[in-house]
Image: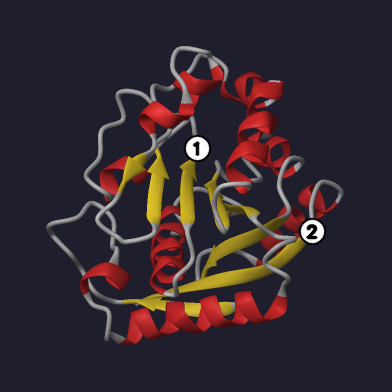
Amino acid sequence: MGIVNKRLSHSTKPLNIVTATYKNSKISEEYRTVRTNFLSSINIQEHQALIITSPNQGEGKSTTIANFAISLAHSGKKVLLIDANLRRPTLHTTFNASNYVGLSSVLLGKTVLEDIVIETEISGLKLLPGGPVPYSPADLLELPTMKNLINKVTGEYDVVLIDSPPALEFADAKIIASNCDGLILVAQWGKTKNKEIVFAQRKLLNSIKILGVIINEKK
């Protein structure tokens, strides 16, 4: 689907949201290319809920999904970004938001979705943070409540992007994928091994259609 070369460092943000701060940079243009490839290759009405995962930890998945979400919002799409990595939620730090309540709180019935979806500074982009880390993330994600939540938000947004734990390390990605329309796999050039990408694809193929792979080229 595309290659993103991440070479800028931002001391003011825990994660690089270069598409928001450097809109005319080479990296932002690369994300726009990924966006264009994505939008031209699928029927957006049939691929509203997308899960983004990686084979392993540390491959730039959360940075990629944040920048991709911003790029989609810049194109006029109404986007909801969900942090479903209930083991290590990080997207709230990217947008300087609270993680006091979030997805885990909704799935446990402690609050309602409408009360905790956060307006980001990016027009058209909202965030549902992960919330407190639960005792058993996989069991929580398997509840019918998760499927109901995804069904609800796909009726309210043009695109729903869901961040998940690494596919080869936990069952969570496969669980979430069964409720989504498509999957994008993120890998890091020089770190992710080809066999790990193949293993991740094989693990997920029975659960969801894999739309493409984004390669992070980190120098």
The residue depicted at 68 percent of the width and 57 percent of the height is 183
Does residue 165 appear left or right of residue 128 in this picture? right
Depth check: 45 or 146 in front? 45
Depth check: 143 or 76 in front? 76
Q: CA distance from mark 2 to mark 1?
A: 20 Å
Q: Is residue 61 visible?
A: no
Depth check: 43 or 165 in front? 43
The residue depicted at 43 percent of the width and 22 percent of the height is 133
From the top left corner, tell me how far across and down residue 210 is, in percent: 74, 62
Does residue 152 appear left or right of residue 92 in this picture? right
Tell which circle, 2 or 1, labels the residue nearer the N-terminal end: 1
Asked if marks 2 and 1 touch (Cβ < 8 Å), the reply is: no
151 relative to 71, above or below: above
Identify residue type, mark 1: Asn
47 relative to 126, above or below: below
Identify residue type, mark 2: Lys
Label 2 Cα crowd, 10 Å radius (few <14 / some 14-19 / many 20+): some
Direction left: furthest residue:
12
- The residue to which callout 1 is attached is 85
Please state, as top left, top right, bottom left or bottom right, where the C terminus lies in the image: bottom left
Q: Quadrant of residue 213?
A: bottom right
Does residue 122 appear left or right of residue 157 in this picture? left
From the top left corner, tell me how far across and down residue 110 is, in percent: 45, 12
Direction right: furthest residue:
206
- The residue to which callout 2 is attached is 209
From the top left corner, tell me how far across and down residue 36 is, in percent: 56, 82
